[in-house]
Image: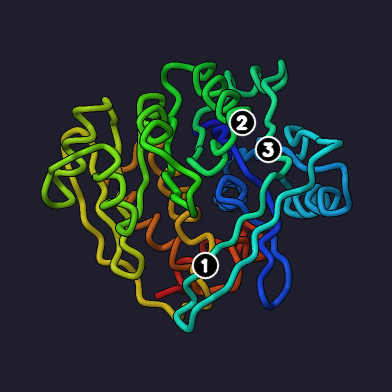
Amino acid sequence: MANPPTVIGLGEILWDLLPSGRQLGGAPANFAYCSHLLGDRAIVASRVGRDQPGEDIRESLAKAGITDRFLQSDSSQPTGTVRVQLDPMGQPKFEITEPAAWDFLEWTQDWQALAKSADAVCFGSLAQRSAKSRSTILDFLAATRTGSLRIFDVNIRQRFYSAEIVCESLRRANALKVNHEEVPRVRELLTMNDAGDSSFCRGLMERFDLSLICITRGANGSLLCDRHHEHEHAGYRVKVKDTIGAGDAFTAALVHEYLRERPLAETNEAANRMGAWVASHSGAMPQIPTNRLQQALKDLV
């Protein structure tokens, strides 16, 4: 591509409070960080408090080479945090505080212009837990160009989702990423009777006019479906430090390859490799020079 595509993580940005200390997180921010490493023009559209944690987020993004121009400031709500506990297998359990600044996303002229410039937008259900942010997210999606990729990462957390949120998000999206643990819940919310992952994907494509669906299966890889084909990847075996952000890294590589019209198998391979690389590190945003990422991915297995 002559110019890198503009790829936006829309929704929450926050501090993950782990036993080892705090780390920058939030699914849209994790997605944008990995998109940046892959060479896309990555932007986080979110909101932080006018507090020290918010200033620290801006500083962290700047160090990573990501602009904070589209981070809104909130004088009355705090910067978001999540308490994270890890089990012996590195699987996280989240306790998400509320309210937070990202519950009050505002629809502005700057964001409207950003939406129109987007080649891809990744959004989830968590940031739609408040009516204010949900309205803004839906406005943002409506303002994107017809050909933009709008990928819905379901990201079910605690009680912060509903059938209405999932349905409306799928109507606004043209791509879906969901993990294997979320599939039964999505089936239930949408009253679907399709048996098997492939039938589930085909049913969703017909119902919501989606062009791409991915079911991630953790260490067991993923299923990727478009309108005409499907591809299964067995995944990569790595020594897992923790799985925080691995799915977001997967989505970043998925979008990166899809925008370049790579074949389905090649896209699936790249996404699994990126997810495994993040899982082999602590936290969702491993530090690495962008010019060393591709070698690190090749050395993974």
Looking at the rendered image, the disc whose residue lies closer to the viewer, 3 or 2, is: 2
Per the image, label 1 sits on a secondary structure element best described as: strand
Left/right of residue 47 with respect to residue 291 in the rendered view:
right
Disc 2, SS: helix
In the rendered structure, which amino acid carries the disc numbered 2? Ser
Give the vertical position of 264 relative to 131 (above or below). Answer: below
User: SS at mark 3?
Assistant: strand
Q: Residues within 10 Å of mark 3 (few under 14, many from 20)?
A: many
Rendering coords of residue 60 (x, y %):
78, 54
Residue 59: percent from left, percent from top: 83, 51
Q: Nearer the viewer, residue 164 or 39?
A: 164
State left or right for residue 133 relative to residue 121.
Answer: right
Cα–Cα gap, marks 2 and 1: 24 Å
Determine contact: label 1, label 3, CB under 8 Å: no
Judging by the rendered image, the residue that carries numbered circle 1 is: 93
Give the Cα separation between the discs numbered 1 and 3. 23 Å
Q: Residue 46 shows which numbered tag?
A: 3
Amino acid carrying mark 1 in the image: Lys
Q: Is residue 58 left or right of residue 274?
A: right
Q: How is the image coloured?
A: rainbow
x 57%, y 45%: residue: 28
Between disc 1 and disc 3, whose residue precedes?
Answer: 3
Vertical relation: 281 (above or below) 250: below
Q: Which numbered disc flags the more N-terminal residue, 2 or 1?
A: 1
Q: Nearer the viewer, residue 101 or 120?
A: 101
Tag 3: amino acid = Ser
User: Who comes first in sequence, dot 3 or dot 2?
Assistant: 3
User: Which residue position holds label 2?
Assistant: 133
Quarter occupied by the C terminus = bottom left
Between tags 1 and 3, which lies in front? 1
The residue located at (67%, 77%) in the rendering is 19
